[in-house]
Amino acid sequence: MSSPEKKVILTCAQPTGQLHLGNYFGALRNWASMIDDYECFFGIVDQHAITLPYVPAELRQATYRNLALYIACGLDPSKCHLFCQSHIIGHTELAWVLGCLCPIGQLERMTQFKDKSQREDSGFIGAGLLNYPVLMAADILLYNADRVPVGEDQKQHVELCRDLAIKFNNTYSETFRVPEVYIPKTGARIKSLQDPLKKMSKSDANQSGCVYLLDSPKTIRKKIRSAVTDSGSEVRAGKDKPGITNLLTIFSSATGRSVEDLEKQFEGSQYGPFKDAVADAVINALEPIQAKYEEIHNDKAYLDSVFKQGAEVAQKRAYKMISKVYRKAGFAPRT
């Protein structure tokens, strides 16, 4: 399956919470469109997920659930490499080497570190949260990825990865490719149904604002019907109508129709019938994903085989890179 002539794409997601519409329309669907043109490594980064308080049994369950959803969303294991971060030797080893090159002040200025540390209710901030971007850089550089598809909120982390790749290359010798930040233009930015000025998020305190990929049709319809709208009754997109704009974006993403076309269809319509139509479109879009998920999510033997298959390819590439890094860094060879 390995294609040396293809450029390497790597992108990962944490197995925290459930995947939602924003994850699918903004990321997963784009990932699926890349697997024929690139050699793709899609990781479930469970080691990142322990930087904040968590329940071990829930993390394990979420890791399998996310793998099943990845496959259900079109990430065919025969065409790409699906792996679990903790299954691969090399991520944390490379993170240590890169961490020794990374100024601590640069980590303290990271937007996500500042935001998450300020929101942490327990008052405890572990070093893992601070070092998160270094481990992310190791995730990318371990596979010598050419491109890293990310959302805008992760762009700063990939820029740090690029800085560390350049610094390592300059300190020791040319070793890493400097990866490109790749933000797909077709990735829809789905906002919260309850606060359309914020992105849809599984960590939102108001779960009515988030439509999960495994929500029942009844739940989806209830959430969309209760979505915040704007003054007036006109169904159109605009900065002055963030609620309706978000629903139009969701409708467009679910159907493939343009926002302009949908505006014309619902010209003169009330918000109620429009919301029902949005709900129908989302339910229809998620139906095949939910069906595939139901088919495979309880088949642990199958999911373990997918992880094993992905790990075999990922580990081979990781060993090659970490061996090169250790040699450049001056470590004595293992005998």
Image (cartoon, rainbow, N blue to C red):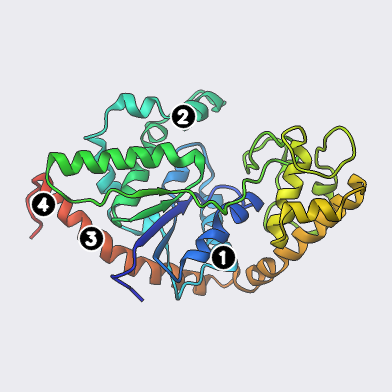
* Residue plotted at (56% across, 26% down): 119
Q: Secondary structure at mark 3?
A: helix
Residue 96 appears in the picture as rendered? no
Pick whichever of labels 3 and 4 is earlier in the sequence.
3
Q: Earlier in the sequence, mark 1 or mark 4?
A: 1
- Judging depth in this view, the residue of 61 and 224 nearest the camera is 224
Q: CA distance from mark 3 to mark 4?
A: 12 Å
Earlier-in-chain disc, 2 versus 1: 1
Q: Which residue is mark 3?
A: 319
Callout 3, which amino acid?
Tyr
- Mark 1 lies on a secondary structure that is helix
| Residue occupied by mark 4 | 327
Q: Residue at x 51, y 23 (%)?
A: 123
Type of the residue with mark 2: Thr
Residue 226 position in % (x across, y down) = 84, 43
| Mark 1, residue position | 68
